[in-house]
Each structure stands twice: as C-alpha cells, then as structure tokens.
Image (spheres, helix red, strand yellow):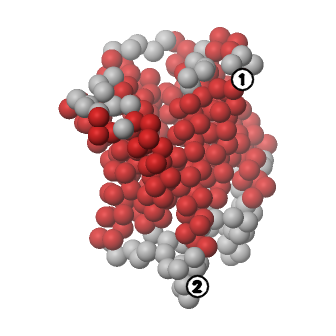
Amino acid sequence: MAQSSPPQGSSLRHPGWLEFAMLLSLALVWGSSFLFIKVAVSNGMPPLSLATARIAIGAAILLTVARLRGQSWPSWSRSGAESGGAGIWLRLTFLGIIGNSLPFFLIGWGEQFTTSQLAAILMATIPLLVLILAHVMTHDEKLTGPKIMGVMCGFAGVVVLVGVDALKGLGAQVIGQIAILGGCLSYTFYGVNARRLPQMGAEMTVGIILALGLLTMLPVWLYVDRPWELAPSGSAWFAVLWLGLLSTAFGNWLFFTLMRRSGASFAATNNFLVPVMGLGWGFFGYHEVPGANALVALVLILVGLALPRLRRR
C-alpha cells in the first residue's frame, strides 16, 4: 500500500465548472440515500441485507459496463504496465474492505449507540481527515491555508445544519462514537489509497472493489439476516434498486472519477453537501421542511468549497 504516486508531476486539474457539476451531482445522488434507506428498512429490508444487495447491484452493473467497454481484468502476471501483478488484487481487496464492508459495519453498529445528528457531524470530519492524510501520502495534495480554512468552514456549516445541540452528545456513549469515527477513518484511507492504483478503467476498478467488498460481507450477512426468511415489500425492492443503481454504481464511479481528476481532498468535500441534499430529498419525499439554519449552513458550506479553489494570480 506504500506505493508512491506517479512520478510524472501532478495529473490533477484545478476544479472547474465540470468538476463542481460532478461534485454537485455526487452529493445529489448520495443525498438521496437517506430517503431510500428509510423506505427500504421501513418495508421489511434489514440494514445489512440492504447494504449487501446495493453493493451486489453496483458491482454487477459496473463490471458489465467495463466488459462492454472492452476493459480488461487485472492480470496476475507482472507483464503489463497496468496489471501490477498479483499485488493489485490484494490492494483492490484492501480497498473493498476499507471502502465498503468495514465502514458500513462500523457506522451502522455505532449509530445504535448515538444520535443520527451526531453521526452526521462525525461523518463531516472525513474531508478534514482526507486533507491531512493526502498531505502525508501524496505529492500533489499538500496542505495550504485556504484548504484548511475551507474545510473548517464546511465543517461549521454541517454543525449549523444538524444543530449545535448535537455536540452535547460528544463524550457520552463513547463506544458508538469511536466506531463511527473508525468508519470515517476507513473511508479516508480508501479515498487516498484509491488514487494510488495503476491506471485502469474506472468502471472495472470500482466494480472489482465493490465485488471484493461484497465477498467479505457475505458470510456475516448469511449468518445474521438469514435472507431466505425475509419478505420485503415491492417499495423496499424499488428502494434497493435505486440505491444499487444510482447511489452505489453511479455514485462510486462518479466519486472515483472525480478523485482522479481533482484529488481525494476535493472529492471528499461531498460530505459537506450530502446532508444539505438529504434535506432536499426529505422535503420532496416526506414534506420535511428545513429550518432557517439550512440556508446559513448552505452559505457556509459553499464558502468552504470556494476558499481552497482560490489561487494567487
């Protein structure tokens, strides 16, 4: 995992309108997850079965698209520049675990012991963790003053959005908070390490990562949920298809593509926009009206996104 970034200078581009449109689309898609997860679990689909099903759908779709586009499987030999030998499979398995099965388990388990509001705030630490880790592990995503100010401003926006009172829960039910932070740290390592893979097709790369993450989840899922005894409703299956097709397949592909174009730090800032988009989906799906704090939070988050993009002439 300690392979360095490609030596030929930075391949990252300064985010432009296209990259910001991709970031907004990613937040819009991932923000819908809150609504459709609620639909699925309220209609007979246990959380672990939901996670397993959506990852399976996402992996199947991306691997099918990859093969249709002529993308090759990574080779076990070391003869190809893009294959990297058997070691690439170990790295993809590692990414499948830290990017899917491990954080899904840690965050889901941790939320049993803490509030969803506090969990949202803890999840908003991901861009800050990515910023620090990318500074250490990459050559082209170094810490700068505007980056730090932008991340802190975005984090403040999430706190305002969720509610400052949620911070009162910090320090109570510590075991759940540690588990959620462990999931955040797992996502952080995924974001930084995924950039360091050899150049393969995005669909093939993300599809394999999802498939390998699925394999590590299957034994736990079969033992815990006994899926042959479940009887979800039609609306639950619709929610599963939405989450598998859009939130998992398209969302993960978009995140990986955005990360390759503009870096892990920029891609991770979607964690500030996702709660805002979640409010919007809640309004349309359940007529949940956001308060005035949502507007203040949105302004803070947008300022936080803009600050790191300012460059000296």
The amino acid pointed to by label 1 is Val
Residue 5 disc label: none
The answer to whether residue 266 of the structure is visible from this angle is no
Identified at 70% across, 12% down, the residue is 168
**Secondary-structure class at tag 1:** helix
Residue 78 disc label: 2
Which is nearer the eye, 219 or 261? 219
First in residue order: circle 1 vs circle 2: 2
Identified at 70% across, 40% down, the residue is 128
Task: Count how many numbered circles sit on residues in the image.
Answer: 2
The answer to whether mark 1 and mark 2 are in CB contact below 8 A is no
Image-based side of 141 in relation to 211, left or right? right
Percent coordinates x, y for residue 70 in the rendering: 34, 76
Image-based side of 64 in relation to 132, left or right? left
228 shown above or below 195: above
Residue reaching furthest to the bottom: 79
Quadrant location of the N terminus in the rendered image: bottom right
Identified at 44% across, 37% down, the residue is 224
Percent coordinates x, y for residue 186 in the rendering: 64, 46
**Secondary-structure class at tag 2:** loop
The amino acid pointed to by label 2 is Arg
Q: Quadrant of residue 118?
A: top right
Q: Report crowding for label 1: few under 14, some 14 to 19, many 20 or more residues within 10 A (C-alpha).
A: some
Image-based side of 256 in relation to 164, left or right? left
Which is nearer the eye, 41 or 304? 41
Q: CA distance from mark 1 to mark 2?
A: 46 Å
254 shown above or below 183: below
Q: Which residue is mark 1?
A: 174
Percent coordinates x, y for residue 88 in the rendering: 58, 71
